[in-house]
Image (cartoon, helix red, strand yellow):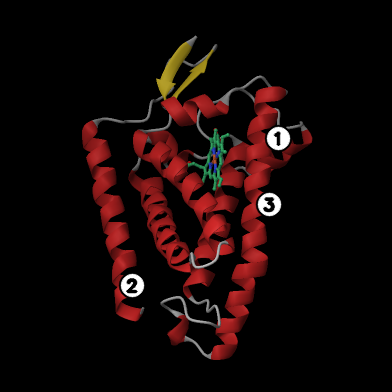
Amino acid sequence: MRSIRVWDLPTRLFHWLLVGSVIGMFITANVDDALSWHFRIGYFIASLLLFRVVWGLVGGYWSRFTHFRWSVQGFFRTLRGGLREPSHVGHGHAGTWSVVALLTVLGAQVTTGLFSDDDISMAGPLASLVDGEWVSRLTSIHKEVTKVGVLVLVLLHVGAIAFYAWRRKQNLVRAMVTGDHSLDEMPINTPASRDGWAQRALALVIWAACAAAVAGMVSRFG
Ligand code: HEM
């Protein structure tokens, strides 16, 4: 059994901070007087999503979009085969498309939130840029469409992870916690993701720039 670093620390932190933040978004959307926290967590999620897009270009080997398995045929073959895939490291075909769907719908949820208005006291920082009709349209999409999309995709995501553990005897969660993935027959030349302190410092700088961009947008228009 050979083990290599698959998920660098920035990718793992991104994932678990995103999980906590999405849970926080659902709680603060449904608790009285928590809307200001809903906004803050939303800005934090925006910074995480921006970070992940940049990290998909310059991050560790298996976090890069170029090393996702994009084949649409491969995706449908995996679905038809009951989520059975040849053993691999990184995101498989099903993982790739579920991750892309999750990131896209979360992006849409955050974007519509920036234009939303609760009709009482709080409005997203970009609501003043469009007319009232668009604000109510985007608010409805935020509350009724993209929110449901996020819920459905999260349930599918967690369901698929549980299915892999139960039926395929593959523990994917361990790699998302420790960073390392073990395979019985790992080809000897399988590359590992770089995860040294220089790489981690770069991730911090990128996230700080993304957070500053979001803060700049809020203070400019909010
Ligand atoms: C709000 C809930 C969640 C969201 C929004 C979410 C989102 C994501 C995203 C965006 C990725 C891609 C990571 C990357 O490449 O950057 C991912 C991967 C992953 N997530 Fe989650 N996740 C959620 C909950 C969970 C939970 C509860 C678990 C574990 C029980 C989990 C386990 C994993 C694993 C193992 C992967 C890697 C999948 C693979 O190997 O292809 N996730 N998740």
Quarter of the rendered image showing ligand 1: top right
Secondary structure under the numbered disc 1 in the rendered image: helix
Q: Which comes before the other along the chain, label 3 or label 1? A: 1
Name the residue nearer the viewer: 159 or 64.
159
Across and down, in percent, residue 183 comes to 53, 16
Left or right of 138 in this view: 190: left
Q: Which comes before the other along the chain, label 3 or label 2? A: 3
User: Amino acid type of disc 2?
Assistant: Met
Crowding near the residue tagged with mark 1, few <14, some 14–19, many ≥20 C-alpha atoms within 10 Å: some
Across and down, in percent, residue 4 comes to 41, 20
Residue of label 2: 217
Check whether the beta carbons of the residues at disc 3 and disc 1 lie within 8 A of each other.
no
Crowding near the residue tagged with mark 2, few <14, some 14–19, many ≥20 C-alpha atoms within 10 Å: some
User: Amino acid type of disc 1?
Assistant: Thr
In this view, 101 is above or below 81 = below
Residue of label 3: 152
Secondary structure under the numbered disc 3 in the rendered image: helix
Name the residue nearer the viewer: 111 or 71.
111
Q: Residue at x 57, y 42 (%)?
A: 96
Left or right of 214 in this view: 188: right
**Quarter of the image with the C terminus in it:** bottom left
Secondary structure under the numbered disc 2 in the rendered image: helix
Instruction: Give the quadrant of residue 13.
Output: top left
Q: Give the number of the disc on residue 78.
A: 1
Of badges 1 and 2, the one in the foreground is 2
Instruction: Give the quadrant of residue 82.
Output: top right
Q: Residue at x 26, y 46 (%)?
A: 204
Across and down, in percent, residue 6 comes to 43, 28
User: Amino acid type of disc 3?
Assistant: Val
